[in-house]
Amino acid sequence: MPEVLIFAVGLGSGCPLPVLGALAGVVWAPAPLVAPVLAIGVVLSVRRLPRDSAGDDESTFLRAVSTELQAGSTLRTAMIAAADRAPGLELADWARRAAAGRPLGELGAQLGARLPTAGRTTAAAIAVASTSGGASSDIFAVLAQTAEEALAVQRERSVATAQVRRSAVVVAGAPVPVLGWLAARGTYGELLAMPVGRLVLMVGLGLEVAGIAAIATMLRGVKDPEDQLVLLGDLTLLGLLAGLPFIQAVGAAAVHLDAPAAAEVETLVRSARRDGVEAALRSHRGPLEDLLRLAARATATGAPLASAVAGFTSEAREGQRARALVDA
């Protein structure tokens, strides 16, 4: 029977058993039992979904690096030791390359690709710490806190969008068992043979596609676009904690920004060389000017730049978090 072949292919391709069981029930069960069988399959499939713990492992890893550095370890040794404390990140092969003496810049880029939340800033932190030294334990403590805050935003957004995502599953999946049931009963061909049946099918599929597209568009709108101002603040703070002057810290951050923001920072650096740091910071105009004006005030008053930048970045991140939750 064709149905048996379909289920054999599904099983061989790794389709979860609860899903196959639900489909088999839809095809072969008596009509009154189709809905209960499908409901049981959905519940079992949802319970089998993996729980995402990568964010927790990420902050655990970064805090472990900070702790090892405070205990006197080198950056390389600290990262190797911290890899064992975050098994969910699967860093064993990366730790072996680190122990083999691969360059820190290369290791930082590879590590950044494996950290879903703070990967970009972590790669930058390793580059800064490897070239400038300084308070690298503080750098990784800040990164861990940033990862924890970002994970909290993701979880709150997930809760806020849970209802629409469940609705999307129902809307997208409901016609599949119905069509399979019609095909198994031999009435699918009869439906297509009637002009009214073809019309109903085309309208239904059109509405289905439109509904899925609308839901996908809404969900895409609540993804966290990376705020370049927040990223610049984070990376500048890393440079300041490593002992760099403000302009050098901003310049080091530019290579990790998107092209428009990086070009804006390059313009600032050239202006600082020509007119002086304070004048360049005060006269700058652009999307990043709020952070630069703050730095200018701190420079003029003698306030600690690192504390000022940390406070500004935290406030900007809270605003980003509020906007993300409102969108969700």
Image (cartoon, rainbow, N blue to C red):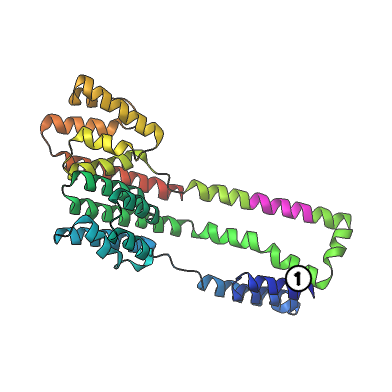
| Quadrant assignment, res 19 | bottom right
Q: Residue at x 27, y 34 (%)?
A: 251
Residue 311 seen in the figure: no
Q: How many C-alpha atoms fall within 10 Å of the one at disc 1: few (<14), some, or many (≥20)?
A: many
Q: Which residues are magenta?
A: 201-211
What's the residue at 60%, 75% (across, down)? 18
The amino acid at mark 1 is Trp
Residue 2 point in image, percent of width and height: 78, 72
Looking at the image, which residue is at 69% across and 71% down? 9
Q: Is residue 158 visible?
A: yes
Q: Looking at the image, which residue is at 66% across and 70% down?
A: 10
Q: Where does residue 322 sit, x and y in percent of width and height?
A: 37, 47
Residue 285 image position (x, y, % from top left): 31, 25
| SS state under label 1 | helix
The correct choice, above or below, for 257 with respect to 293 in the image is below
Q: How many marks?
A: 1
Give the residue number, with chain letter if any, for mark 1. Answer: 181
Q: Which residue reaches farthest front?
A: 100
Query: Going by the image, does 205 lie left or right of 281?
Result: right
Q: Is residue 24 above or below residue 207?
A: below
**Residue 125 shown left or right of residue 212 in the figure:** left
Q: Residue furthest top?
A: 275
